[in-house]
């Protein structure tokens, strides 16, 4: 059972009841990298950092101590389409946690000295990131697949632009996007022991929602002054179409190991074809050691330590990638093996026994993943933020069960066609 409601200030609330003594709560904001203008690159992630730097009621140290002082955990992350602040605490501290989260998200002050200080922290983060080519290459492939669009920009931004931001700049971004109606408060905790609701009524959520009402009510007038700007759709390019006709790019980064990525545009979070790619992706380079790419490149030939594939679904676009790292003289051989596995799925449908086995594996992985309650809550909160409903395991399983070998082959032919694959190599 799920409870959903909207507080007087316009903040939607969704709860995921549990019997655990540990409560998770958070605020998801529908604002990420794609909401930035060219003059605001890195702003969404920067504002995530600044939310921890104090409000009228709490200093930065008081924010941290309020949660960690009772043994809780307080964290946040920024994606291309959202920013999420969350914490885990014992259930008796849930009200405190919700109050702290709402205060820091909706009432952060961004004093100029903290903006300047935190800017250097993020610049150090950028330098660390740039020293990790296995991560940096993911951003560049997205930039190649979404040329000139915010979805292609890296989340951290660049140091020169960050150092130009003032407190007024960051507050303007927060005023535009951190409005209660553009956010979601999510809670996973035991139900409040109140009398049963009227027939057909909703179950009351866990205690602590009153804290959210206190801290969001003061933002109602301020948030209504700035309408949410329109978010531009990515440039045209369906599944199987990269930034060009199968471009092949090599960057000389002086790395000991070669880092290689193949990528192509794929399906959005609303495209029914994504289910076939979801299963194909797991077959090729999912987390299991028996994925086809792992068996071929690592287990049989010992050419790589890491090889995986990934699909990312945004609200109106998507991409699919393969990554591996290998000795530089093995790059061409590894690329031929990857191409061979892609061609196998394009040219020949899976047998009934293969299809059944791959479905069984994926459904088992999903069941285990759902047992990680923190990740389950975070994933469902983000899904609820963007779609208005949770992502139920039985719904996913039903789509997987309905897939046919022909569905997979047609999707492979569309997504894995060599002319649509962009290849990027760091050496």
Image (cartoon, rainbow, N blue to C red):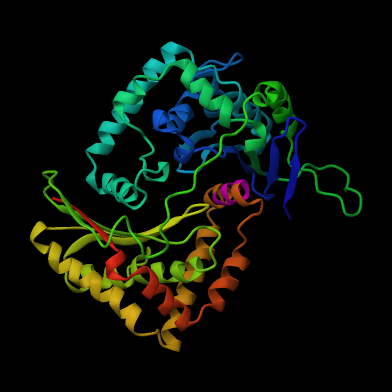
In the image as oriented, which residue stretches furthest toward the left?
A: 329
In the image as oriented, which residue stretches furthest toward the bottom?
A: 352
Task: Please name the residue shown 56% across and 40% down the image.
Answer: 30
Q: Position of residue 107 (x, y in %)?
A: 60, 21
Label the magenta part by its dominant secondary structure.
Answer: helix
Q: Position of residue 226 (x, y in %)?
A: 62, 26
Q: Which residues are magenta?
A: 379-385
Query: For this view, does 77 lie left or right of residue 183?
Result: left
In the image as oriented, which residue stretches furthest toward the right?
A: 198
Q: Is residue 277 above or below residue 4?
A: below
Task: Please name the residue shown 13% across and 50% down the image.
Answer: 427
Most foreground residue, 260 or 305: 260
Task: Please name the residue shown 24% across and 37% down the image.
Answer: 130
In the picture, residue 405 is in which quadrant?
Answer: bottom left
In the picture, residue 412 is in which quadrant?
Answer: bottom left
Most foreground residue, 220 or 249: 249
Query: Would residue 60 be seen by someone viewing this image from the given angle?
Result: yes
- The quarter in which the N terminus is drawn is bottom right
Q: Number of marks in the image?
A: 0
Is 383 included in the stretch rendered in magenta?
yes
Q: Position of residue 324 (x, y in %)?
A: 24, 59
Q: Position of residue 74 (x, y in %)?
A: 51, 33
Is 31 included in the stretch rendered in magenta?
no
Query: Would residue 69 be seen by someone viewing this image from the given angle?
Result: no
Query: For this view, does 70 lie left or right of residue 190?
Result: left
Task: Please name the residue shown 62% across and 52% down the image.
Answer: 387
Q: Is residue 124 above or below residue 1?
A: above
């Amino acid at each position: 059972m799920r409870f959903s409601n909207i507080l007087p200030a316009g903040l939607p609330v969704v709860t995921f009841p549990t019997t655990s003594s540990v409560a998770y709560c958070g605020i998801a904001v529908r604002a990420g990298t794609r909401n930035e203008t060219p003059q605001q690159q890195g702003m969404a992630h920067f504002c995530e950092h600044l939310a921890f730097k104090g409000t009228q009621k709490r200093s930065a140290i008081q924010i941290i101590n309020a949660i960690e002082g009772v043994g809780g955990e307080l964290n946040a992350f920024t994606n291309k389409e959202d920013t999420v602040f969350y914490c885990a605490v014992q259930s008796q501290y849930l009200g405190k946690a919700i109050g702290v989260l709402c205060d820091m998200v909706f009432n952060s002050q961004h004093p100029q000295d903290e903006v300047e200080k935190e800017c250097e922290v993020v610049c150090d983060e950028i330098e660390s990131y740039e020293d990790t080519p296995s991560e940096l290459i993911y951003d560049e492939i997205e930039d190649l697949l979404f040329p000139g669009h915010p979805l292609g920009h890296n989340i951290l931004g660049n140091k020169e632009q960050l150092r130009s931001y003032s407190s007024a700049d960051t507050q303007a971004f927060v005023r535009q996007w951190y409005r209660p109606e553009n956010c979601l408060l999510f809670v996973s905790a035991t139900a409040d022991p109140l009398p049963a609701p009227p027939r057909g009524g909703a179950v009351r959520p866990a205690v602590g929602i009153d804290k959210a009402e206190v801290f969001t009510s003061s933002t109602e007038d301020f948030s209504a002054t700035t309408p949410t700007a329109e978010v531009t759709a990515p440039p045209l390019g369906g599944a199987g179409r990269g930034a060009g006709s199968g471009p092949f790019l090599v960057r000389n980064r002086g790395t000991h190991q070669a880092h290689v990525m193949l990528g192509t545009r794929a399906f959005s979070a609303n495209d029914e074809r994504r289910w076939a790619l979801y299963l194909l992706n797991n077959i090729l380079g999912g987390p299991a050691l028996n994925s086809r790419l792992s068996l071929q490149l690592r287990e049989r030939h010992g050419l790589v330590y890491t090889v995986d594939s990934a699909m990312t679904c945004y609200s109106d676009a998507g991409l699919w990638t393969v990554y591996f790292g290998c000795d530089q003289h093995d790059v061409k051989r590894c690329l031929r093996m990857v191409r061979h596995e892609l061609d196998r799925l394009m040219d020949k449908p899976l047998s009934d026994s293969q299809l059944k086995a791959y479905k069984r594996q994926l459904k088992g992985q999903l069941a285990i993943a759902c047992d990680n309650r923190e990740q389950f809550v975070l994933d469902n909160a983000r899904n609820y933020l963007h779609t208005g409903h949770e992502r139920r395991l039985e719904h996913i399983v039903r789509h997987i069960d309905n897939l046919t070998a022909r569905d997979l082959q047609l999707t492979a032919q569309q997504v894995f066609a060599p002319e649509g694959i962009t290849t990027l190599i760091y050496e």
